[in-house]
Image (cartoon, helix red, strand yellow):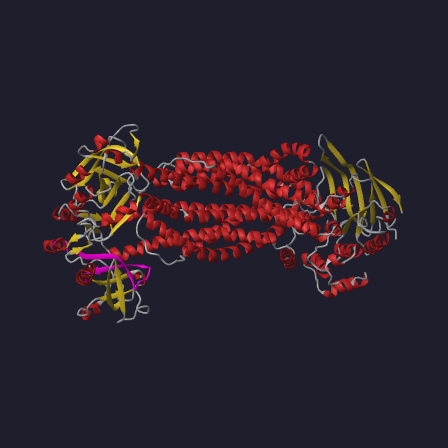
Amino acid sequence: MNQTDSDYSSVVVMTNVSRSFDDVKSSRAVLDNVDFKACSGNLVAITGPSGSGKSTFLHLLGGIDIPDHGRILVKDTDMTCLNETGRTLFRRKNIGLVFQFFNLIPTLNVIENLRLPLELCSLKSDDSVIFPLLERFDLEQQAYSYPDRLSGGEQQRVAVIRSAIHKPSLILADEPTGNLDDAQGHVVLDLIRQVSNDGTCVIMATHSASASEYADRHYKITNGKLHEATQI
Amino acid sequence: MASSTKPHKFEGHDGASGLLLKIFLREQKKSPGPILLTLLSVTIGVAAIVGVDITSHSALSEFERANKLNSGLATHQIVGDVRGLDENIYTKIKLDGRFPNAAPIVQTEVTVNSGERSWQLLGIDPLSDYRIRESGLLGDGYMQQIEKAWPIHVPDTKMWPIGSTLRIQYGNRQVDFIVAGEILNERDQPDTDADGFLVTDIMWAQAFLKRLGLLTRIDLRLNSETDARQLQSILPNSVRLIDLQTRHTAQRDMTRAFRTNLTALGYLTLLVSMFLIYNSTVFQIARRRGMLSQLRAIGYTHHEITRILGTELSIIALTGVSIGVCLGYLLSSLMLALVTDTINILYFDLAQSSVRLPIETILKSVGMGFLGTAIAGVVPIREAGRIAVKSLSIRSFEEDKALTLSRKIIPIGICCFVMGALLIIFSEQSLAIAFAGLFLLVLGPAACTPWLIHQICQVLAPLVGNTLGLVAKLAIVNIRSHLSRTGISVIALSLAVSASLGVTLMIDSFRYSVDNWIHHYMRSDLYVVSTMPDEPYFSDLFRSQMEVLEGVESAGYSTRISIQTKFGLHNLLAMDISASSFRGFMIQTPSEVDLWKQFNQSRTVLVTEAFANRHAISVGDQISLPTTQGDIPFEVIGIYLDYSSEHGLLATSWANFNRYFPNSGPTTVSVVLEPGIIPSDIKQRIKNIEDAPEQLLIRSNRELREQILYIFDQTFEITELLRWLTLLVAITGMIFSLVALQLERSSLNAKFKAVGFSRAQLTLQIIFETSITGFLAGLIAIPLGLMLCMCLIDVINVRSFGWTMMTRIDPVFIFATAGISTLSASAAGIYPAMRMWRTPITTGLRDE
């Protein structure tokens, strides 16, 4: 399970990144001169107390937010030098996102939700691509169901497949099991592990200790600093 | 780690639009409310513009059509007094030889086969008429029909086949004419513009009307002003030569103010609609914020989001414009009837025309519909495209932004207000610019409404909390915190309600002024006129018998003639009345001076305020009038208030009239009865007077006053229709906004229920919240409506019609304004409250 940097090339390199937010009276540094690196096939867990900056860390990596200073390279592309449209187009092809609240498009069924990133990237998106995945992750019965007909665990599994279906280099998962019970959570984490094993770099923000056990590397954010907690 | 970085601009490609379109279409199917409001707003806005435009255009076309058939290529007309023109004048002109292009005309209004519709019976001389009208009217075949008795040509022989009988009625007279053919155009084809006309030989027209030897007029084609002067020199003083170009322009100008007023109301409806388009677009985006965030997270660019939202709005606009054009077309049928009636009452006789849908109206309304939708939708759509993924799940972000926006809009509102005031002040006589100024004047303060409501609620919340309890306080807090959703509806409602209040107060003030004027002006008990056009005058014998009629205290006499002054064609009112009746005149300038003595002096006239304002006439000025002794200057001794004619009137004494103008006798008698005499008792006695005209119309003071006010009310029916249309749009928008907002909060209501709030408490909170929102919008609209009323009375009316009026602020209308606003908003709370009752707590909580 464990891979080293030498085995895979770096997908993410974060150098000296800071991000602060204006509070009512002062400015609060959420991330302070953070350095970070992750490679293909890595599954990295980021933990920390509420408000510590886990989501901000993922937003910066996903190009959803930009740092006050520092450099973020994703697949050798400096995200801080791209404009909004550039970051969006880069994210479309290279980054998958998984949220706590599943965030499937409610008016599209499972197949259509999965087809969305493929069509966006002009990739083959017919049933021959999608059904094998649904079968692999035991979701073929739900292929034509709409999200409101799925359980939380099923929705999150579809969301994880959607984030990975177009084979991005990086998947960012923000509390992917935060809304699930233990059993469902483990199913989703198994899926994430499999995606990572397929060679995708997955960075996951979580509160859950059991979730972080799935990771190859475990980082903790405290007082704006990122510390490597454990090398699994 | 790679040391090199890629170029700054990432070269990507646009993503799938098929699935995106599917997402949006399914969204709309799931919750069609906002899209229906947008559609309704575009539809009503466009319908109002189309309706007003078609109505205005059709009325003008009817005017041109009637002129084309009436006057043809004629440049001038010779007319006599109300009785007509001696046929010998035509003979004299023909014998003179210098004016070959002349044609005698006999024309009157008749009814056919006992129907209600009025037709113009035109008696022409086919041998000379071709020189005037492009069309041959009766065609070459006429000569073959000359031996037929009572022949008549009709616009459509499908309706009345050749050889069929038409019973033509005029007063008590009726004759069966035989249809001889169709009215033809210049290509000898049936004239499609001839609807409303019946044409016969002049001889038959004279025989039918018993006006042998008399003409209605002579139409002429003169080549130059020199010709006109030469012709004038051979005409007797009792007849007038009228320049038709001047008259047509004057008639067209007369209706311009009226049409501009209508157009302004039409555009107001569009403006209110634009607010609602904006509002419903914001709603749609707010409702789909979560979905948009996901799409942005997946990788859709803001261009793609903007494009699809823009496409969606364009489809709505296209649908709305199409329905709006059709609805406007239907609406115009109703409006045209009202407008034609109003033009007939106020300006000149116009037949009920058919509705025409000109291509320029379609292009204009399509353009305005799309432009309005684009202007209203561009900001929210741009904002939607720029939504940052991370901010999408934060609700307070939007409310904060709305509050910031409501603050930012205040300087813009103040600028609009100042600019509006400046436009009104410096627009001089331009009505269109004055209306634009008026829009800005009201729009500016209306734009500040959300901020004002926020401030009011901030003050109210603790007060209400302390006095009415937590439920009421929550309602006030909710109003404040949902301004991003309700703010624009509140502006639209304030705008529509203030416009409605302003227009209502103006009409009420106008009505009050007219009523007051009638009260002053009409001091007699009975008013007598002849209804026989060929016998309009009261003889001296009638007058002498009237003086001694039992029960009659005194009688006054008057008549009106048209005179051509350097300002155009105007009516001159000549009066033979007592000093006490004269004091019924509401003299504006000079004030508090008795002009009775001066009025009876030689060469003096009074002019109406409308005349004075339109032509910048002051007391002491001289106006040259065409008299039987040539052009003679008359001194203006006073300016008086008169609402009977917006293009102005001159008044002179009977002595002056006798001396300087062709006097055939009075046409109106006003009778003051002795105390205790009942008007109805004396009517028959007047009819029995020897030498009284055959048919008399005798109306009591009350009857005439009621009729004038009835006509007044009729002329404002079209304004009322548009006013209600605007209100309807705004109220619908307000109700929709509040319903949608409340429905969105079903999960919050479920939480309240979960913690122990009763249904009654929650219902009270919902209704209280919506009612207070409506009440505040209405409250803010009141000063705006008052301001609008002042501007309409003191600026727009003076420029449109030339007259001033008293301002009357009836508190009933003010209460009604606040009431309409509050009630419509209260109604908006009913459905969400009912839904809240039915929704189980668990469902409400799950919705979150």
Left or right placement of residue B63 versus residue B226 in this view: right
Q: Which residue lies furthest to the top in this view?
A: B592
Point out the stretch of residues depicted in magenta.
B97-125
Answer whether residue B250 is visible to the viewer in this image. Answer: no
In the picture provided, is B58 more to the left or to the right than B607? right
**Residue B118 covered by magenta stretch:** yes
Can residue B663 be spotted in the picture? yes
Q: In this view, does A198 lie above or below B551?
A: below
Q: Residue B282 location in percent, x, y?
A: 60, 47
The N terminus of chain B sits in image quarter? top right
Front one among A30 and B96: B96
State the image quarter where residue A116 is shown. bottom right
Q: In which image quadrant can residue B622 be found?
A: top left
Q: Main secondary structure of the magenta part?
A: strand
Question: How far across and how far down the image is residue B406, in percent?
Answer: 59, 37
* Location of residue B580 with respect to A200 vertically, above or below: above
Provide residue B351's location: percent of width, then percent of height: 32, 56
Quarter of the figure with residue B260: top left
- Verify whether residue B778 appears in magenta: no
